Image (cartoon, rainbow, N blue to C red):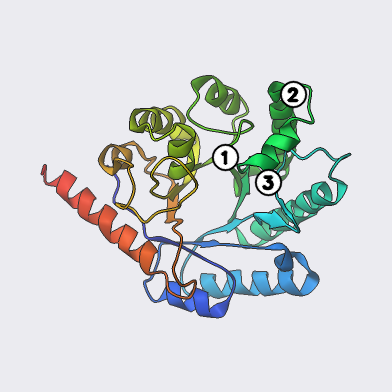
Amino acid sequence: MISPLLGLKGSSNRQQIDDRLQYHPDVYEFYTDANDFTPEGYQHLDEAVQYVQSKGISKIVIHHPMVFKKWHSEVVAPENYFPELYRFIETSTEQLISLAQERNIQVLVHGGYAGKEVQEMVNLYPNVEAARQAVYDRLDRFARAGGNHIMFENSIAPVFAYGHPEQENEILSHNYRLAFDTSHCFIEMHGDNQALQASLKHLREHVVHYHLVDSLGQTHDSLQLGKGKIDWAPVLKLLNPNATSIYEINLHDQSNCHEQIESHHYLVDLANKLAQGA
């Protein structure tokens, strides 16, 4: 069983970074938005990465921006219907891969998000299988470009979801480096802990990064660990010990990562109890 890493998330804002750094995290994940991909924003992001590295943190992940203008950054979005969004996803991913290769860090791209918007995009294809194939085709390109510097995260959407063994086998056939969000899988499986555990076990060897997040299993609630319905003891035993992880929790105050720290304390306490056979 692994000893939980302290993985924290924040933006490239120096106040947020310094708040996280006071806890000496093992992993830092950058949240980004569209402003980080202007020339000035990109330089600021690069400088923020180097600042975190200067503090002795080598395990760094940059999360591809969730939103562009009024849309989620859905890789399933067809180019002919969403040319501006499509182009933004292309160029921003290229920029992040370039930065990751230069600084020897990681990029995380979502295979999809959730909700009505992605369903409307999926409906533009002949069927869900065609939409899923379009996602794979795009991720295949990103994977070739990014190599060991890129990973893909699961969604709560029909195009790139964990929890369904057949779809997981499709994903595994592409040999992607995977990011596993526990809450997304738990919600996709409607709060079924056994299904979450089966998915963690099935995908374990291909997972390089975890988002450890609790949930009530109904909507995207991003709860502090121990505040939801995920059974963390078996989850802890099923994590890939070679992967990194962060606590991706909704914060009351973005300049104070209290809920992430409390989540870490919860998991460390649980790991200690399990180690003692309690």
Name the N-terminal-most of marks 3 and 2: 2
Q: Nearer the viewer, residue 156 or 111?
A: 156
Give the residue displayed 72% in from the left and 41% down from the top: 75
SS class, disc 3: helix
Query: Residue 159: image x %, image y %?
Result: 64, 32
Q: Nearer the viewer, residue 209 or 84?
A: 84
Name the N-terminal-most of marks 3 and 1: 3
SS class, disc 1: loop
Query: Which labelled disc corresponds to residue 146?
Result: 3
Give the residue displayed 40% in from the left and 46% down from the top: 215
Query: Residue 1: image x %, image y %?
Result: 27, 42
Find the distance from the CA under tag 2 to the CA under tag 1. Answer: 17 Å
Compared across the picture, whether 20 is left or right of 158 comes to left
Q: Are marks 3 and 2 in contact (CB under 8 Å)?
A: no
Give the residue displayed 60% in from the left and 56% down from the top: 63
SS class, disc 2: helix
Identify the residue under disc 1. 155
Name the N-terminal-most of marks 2 and 1: 2
Tell me the amino acid under the disc marked 2. Answer: Ala
Find the distance from the CA under tag 3 to the CA under tag 2. Answer: 24 Å
Query: Residue 176: image x %, image y %?
Result: 59, 35
Identify the residue under disc 2. 130
Give the residue displayed 44% in from the left and 72% down from the top: 20
